[in-house]
Amino acid sequence: MDHIVYAAKDATFTLMTSNYGIPSLRIEGEGAADRMSCGPSDTVRIGGQPVSAGVLVALWGMQRARTSPQREMAADFCRQWPEGMQVV
């Protein structure tokens, strides 16, 4: 299942799972040079500011409104980068 992590007028950041079950962050829209998939250590731009994809997903995953499957998917994404921010 896909989950929109962040949506702006020029780009959408969607947390999705590959055919192999590995979560990745997909960026689509005019704000993205092209469609691209990111891992947690990759840098993305939100409002012109650089931020790691792992931090973006971890902050999204720790919001109270998240369901258990959403939190688990965010945690799985962040675990790919042990040195980065984690969902707790």
Image: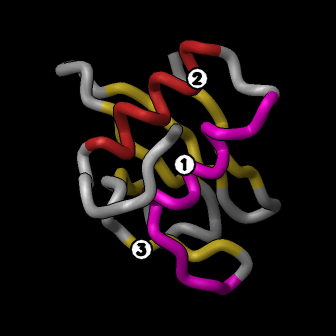
Mark 1 neighbour density, 10 Å: few (under 14) some (14–19) many (20 or more): many
Q: Secondary structure at mark 1?
A: helix
**Element type at mark 3:** strand
Is 57 part of what is drawn in magenta? yes
Q: Which mark is residue 88?
A: none
Q: How many marks?
A: 3
- Across and down, in percent, residue 51 comes to 53, 75
Q: Nearer the viewer, residue 56 or 4?
A: 56
- Residue under pointer 1: 58
| Residue that label 3 marks | 43
Q: Earlier in the sequence, mark 3 or mark 1?
A: 3
What residue span does the magenta drawing correspond to?
Answer: 48-64
Residue at 60% x, 14% y is: 68
* 87 to 18, vertically: above or below: below
Question: Residues under labels 2 and 1: Cα distance?
Answer: 11 Å
Answer with the quarter of the image where residue 23 lies. Answer: top left
**In-front residue for pair 70/20:** 70
Residue 2 location in percent, x, y? 54, 24
Q: Amino acid at mark 3?
A: Thr
Q: Which circle marks residue 70 in the picture?
A: 2
Residue 27 drawn above or below residue 71 = below
Cα gap from disc 3 to disc 2, whole angstroms: 22 Å
> Residue 45, located in which quarter of the rendered image?
bottom right
